[in-house]
Image: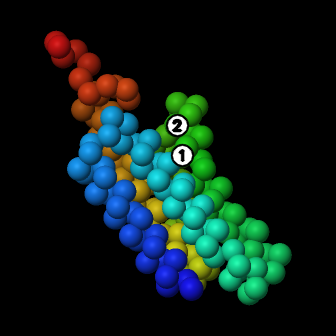
Amino acid sequence: MIGVVSVGAVVGVLLVGLVVLLRRPADTRSVLRWSALVITVLVAAALTPFTVDDSGAAAGYLLGVPVAAAVLPVLAQRLGRLTVAADLVAALVITGWGLLLGLGIGGAFLPAVALLLASAIITRSLRRSGDQPGGSVPTGAVG
């Protein structure tokens, strides 16, 4: 079961990557953050029956920590503050949680980390190039 869910998460991340590369959405960072959240929630939902059978009441936090971490970048984006930090913290928490769980059910959450890291990298590169969050023309450029 865990293997199927993990493969599904990897396929989901690859599909998001293809969509981003081919369609080039206006707000790529938003697409990456929301996709990471959706994939994380779907992984948690798929693993819920298995985790409840195996761990009982502990399933709430075993599956809830990665979901809560994936919500952070979306909330930071809505608030317009500390988005790179939120992406990196969420990626770190999900990775740490996956390793802590011995790459059992936690390993299924790891593919979403790639989307969060990509979002952080894109945001940093846009800031360095001088692009504004909502546009594609560098500041100071004449249209």
| Residue 124 on image: x %, y % | 34, 41
Describe residue 72's horizontal placement relative to residue 112 as left or right.
right
The vertical placement of 8 against 14, above or below, is below
What residue is drawn where x is 60% and y is 50%? 71
Please provide percent x and percent y for residue 97. Answer: 60, 70
Is residue 120 visible in the rendered structure shown here?
A: no
Q: For residue 77, which numbered disc appears in the image? A: 2
Q: Tag 1's secondary structure? A: helix
Look at the image and tell me whether residue 106 can be seen. Answer: yes
Above or below residue 76? Residue 119 is: below
Along the line of sight, the residue nearer the viewer: 41 or 106: 41
Left or right: where does residue 14 sit relative to residue 80? left
Q: Is residue 129 left or right of residue 11?
A: left
Question: What numbered label is drawn on residue 73?
Answer: 1
Q: Position of residue 63 (x, y in %)?
A: 67, 69
For badge 2, the amino acid type reads Gln
Image check: 31 left or right of 107?
A: left
Q: Are marks 2 and 1 in contact (CB under 8 Å)?
A: yes
Numbered badge on residue 130: none
Above/below status of 135 relative to 18: above
Give, as a three-letter code, the residue at label 1: Pro
Give the structural element (helix, strand or loop) at label 2: helix
Q: Horizontal and vertical percent for residue 21? A: 25, 51
- Report the residue at 30% width, 49% height from top: 20
